[in-house]
Image: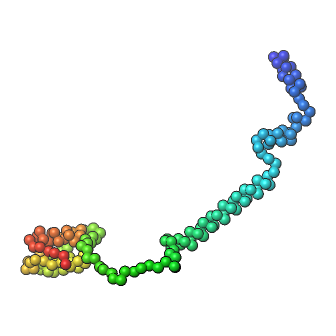
């Protein structure tokens, strides 16, 4: 074991160079190997310029979006003319109005005309019946006007049409 320690000591003595084990020199050598340079102010300047450029771009993009899409849609150019039709036609459609949840219509010896008027007023659709001499008693639960019409037609044995 003594022989090993002497060999190690001899190795250190043989390879020792004056000034080579200095801490400052070691740091300089490390910085050179790792790519770290001593010009830190130049790096700081580049980082600051990059951050400033990114901030300017973000502000410019925000201004562009607010200016062009401020109300949610692109602004139209004032020089664009739009042609309007000379006449406007209204199409007659057969729509089914649906309210939330079922509606309960209550009738107690009610004439058919009054029952149809009640359903018609609720859904906003004009209705006519083939036989107006009958009376309605009971409750009708409907999700839409078609269900109400079907129930009245089936119960009374009449035909109801939309106007």
Residue furthest bottom as drawn? 86
What residue is rendered at 8% in x and 78% in y?
Answer: 131
What residue is rendered at 79% in x and 54% in y?
Answer: 42
The answer to whether residue 110 of the structure is visible from this angle is: no
Residue furthest right as drawn? 18
- Where is residue 29 drawn, in percent x and y? 82, 39
Image quadrant holding the N terminus, namely top right
- Which colouring convention does the figure follow? rainbow
Image quadrant holding the C terminus, namely bottom left
Figure quadrant of residue 121? bottom left
Q: Is residue 53 left or right of residue 146?
A: right
Figure quadrant of residue 17? top right
- Where is residue 86 drawn, in percent x and y? 36, 83
Q: Is residue 68 left or right of residue 137?
A: right
What residue is rendered at 86% in x and 19% in y?
Answer: 6
Q: Is residue 133 above or below residue 27?
A: below
How many numbered discs, if any? 0
The answer to whether residue 91 of the structure is visible from this angle is: yes
- Where is residue 38 drawn, in percent x and y? 82, 48
Figure quadrant of residue 138? bottom left
Q: Is residue 128 left or right of residue 32?
A: left
What residue is rendered at 20% in x and 73% in y?
Answer: 105
- Where is residue 74 drawn, in percent x and y? 50, 71
């Amino acid at each position: 074991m003594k022989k090993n320690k002497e060999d190690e000591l001899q190795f250190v003595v043989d390879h020792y160079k004056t000034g080579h084990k200095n801490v400052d020199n070691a740091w300089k050598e490390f910085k050179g190997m790792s790519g770290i340079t001593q010009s830190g102010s130049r790096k700081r300047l580049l980082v600051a310029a990059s951050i400033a450029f990114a901030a300017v771009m973000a502000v410019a993009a925000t201004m562009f979006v607010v200016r062009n899409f401020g109300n949610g849609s692109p602004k139209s150019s004032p020089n664009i003319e739009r042609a309007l039709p000379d006449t406007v036609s209204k199409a007659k459609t057969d729509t089914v109005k649906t309210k939330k949840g079922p509606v309960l219509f209550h009738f107690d010896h009610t004439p058919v005309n009054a029952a149809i008027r009640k359903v018609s007023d609720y859904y906003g659709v004009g209705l006519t019946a083939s036989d107006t001499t009958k009376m309605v008693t009971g409750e009708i639960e409907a999700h839409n006007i078609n269900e109400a019409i079907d129930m009245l037609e089936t119960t009374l044995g009449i035909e109801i049409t939309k106007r």
